[in-house]
Image (spheres, grey):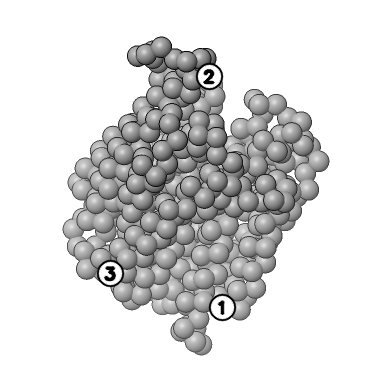
Amino acid sequence: MTVNAPAVLETQPRVRDHRWWALAVLAIAQLMVVLDATVVNIALPSAQKALAFSNADRQWVVTAYALTFGGLLLLGGRMADLLGRRRTFLIGLAGFALASAAGGASTSFGMLVAARATQGAFGAILAPAGLSLLTTAFTEVRERARAFAIYGAIAGAGAAVGLLLGGVLTEYLDWRWCLFVNIVFAVVAAVGAITFLHDQERDPTARLDLPGALLAVAGLAGVVYGFSEASLHGWGSPLTVGFLVGSVGLLALFVLVESRSAHPLLPMRIMVDRNRGGANLAILLVGVGMFGVFLFLTYYLQLTLGYTPIKTGLAFLPMVGAIMVSSTLGGVILLPRSGPRPLIVAGMAIGGAGMVLLTQITVSPDYSGHVLPALLVLGAGMGLIFAAAMNAATAGAEPRDAGVASALPNVAQQIGGALGPALLNTIWTSAVASYRPTGVPVNRAAALAAASVHGDTVAFSVVYVILFVSAVLCLLVLRRGRIPGAPGAVPAM
């Protein structure tokens, strides 16, 4: 592989303290992107009634967003390197806001799906640009740990916050406000970006790797779509198998093309670092577990325990609090001393223990006895993982590669978020179909509830196995030692 592009020089800030204001701006944008993956879920029944689309079609409101987001992330990351990070960040914000406005004003199912797909596309531009700005802004080890602890807490808690926000907006305003609310986030973030963010000089010799971009988009979109089809038609479906096998082939060809390209979309030098690879693996595997938990626990609380959308969102708040406390304390106090490996491994094990507790749920409404302790333990584990993994996944990348290096954690989270519900939904369906009650149920409704809870506990059991196995994998892959400051990087804010 030929590498002939000089390192990009970052623009020095006039006031270094602007970095912390900039962190607030980037956190708002990240929250908007992450919560949008779940905020619409609670609004779906109301949107379906208003726009009169079928049960078979409703999954596209979620899938369209994940498809374009996951498929375009690497391209979005390289755009940040080519066009300038602040410029790309502002383009992403503006596009996301306009797409959200169109989605909220939708008069048909097709218009809503198109708006969601456009949201995902601009989210793929926005997310890596924001993370790369953060990466190049904080280079001193302790400050970087503090900044990534806050950012990791937002990334970990955003999906749960989306459930609460979606419930409040749907119940007290209208389902359309689950999309309109993004305009508020985007305007605040844009004003902050113009005020506090400073762009770097772009590299005039850099070029876009068009063959790599096309292969990456097709391969990643195919993976996300294949997982979505698996949740509907099963893993043995010809369509599911075809998309997944085809995607593997496209991504293998992508690696071959990138290894020979003079201006690769994803330089292979980014992938050879063990810490970076292990951190992205951790984010992917946590995504599998977390998004599956949100899906099944939401249905359990609403359908089995009869919670309202708002009450369901409130039920997740303790987990949000645990993630934020754990991420902040772990990232600020422990990560600079221990490095990422102990935190990620411990986080996986603690998260697995939380899932073990969730397998004890029953049809009886016992939130404080079973669900609450599990959410607190799970949140504590997830916070440790996100604080360390987000930091390790971007540490040490050259300034010219910061955008694409920052896209990889988002790719991992999106793939995990697509794989988790698809895998666990298949397992849940099989468990429910094979369930045989031990006693004599009072009525058919009670039998169905018992079968559903049985499916939930089986799915949660699979998640804790995934997390415990992940702890072993991360122990083997990640290196010992602390994360060094990014060499040669100069703050960009």
Q: Residue at x 25, y 40 (%)?
A: 468
Q: What is the secondary structure assignment of the residue under circle 2?
A: helix
Q: Earlier in the sequence, mark 1 or mark 3?
A: 1
Quarter of the figure with residue 235: top left
Residue in the foreground of this view, choosing between 12 and 206? 12
Question: Badge 3 local density, few (<14 within 10 Å), some, or many (20+)?
Answer: some
| Disc 1, SS | helix
Alpha carbon distance from label 2 to label 3: 50 Å
Residue 397 visible in image: no
Residue holding disc 1: 196
Dot 2 or dot 1, earlier in sequence: 1
For residue 353, above or below residue 268? above
* Residue topped by disc 3: 333
What's the residue type where badge 2 is placed?
Answer: Ala
Q: Position of residue 357 (x, y in %)?
A: 31, 39
Relative depth, front residue between 53 and 115? 53
| Whether residue 191 is situated above or below residue 457 in the rendered picture | below
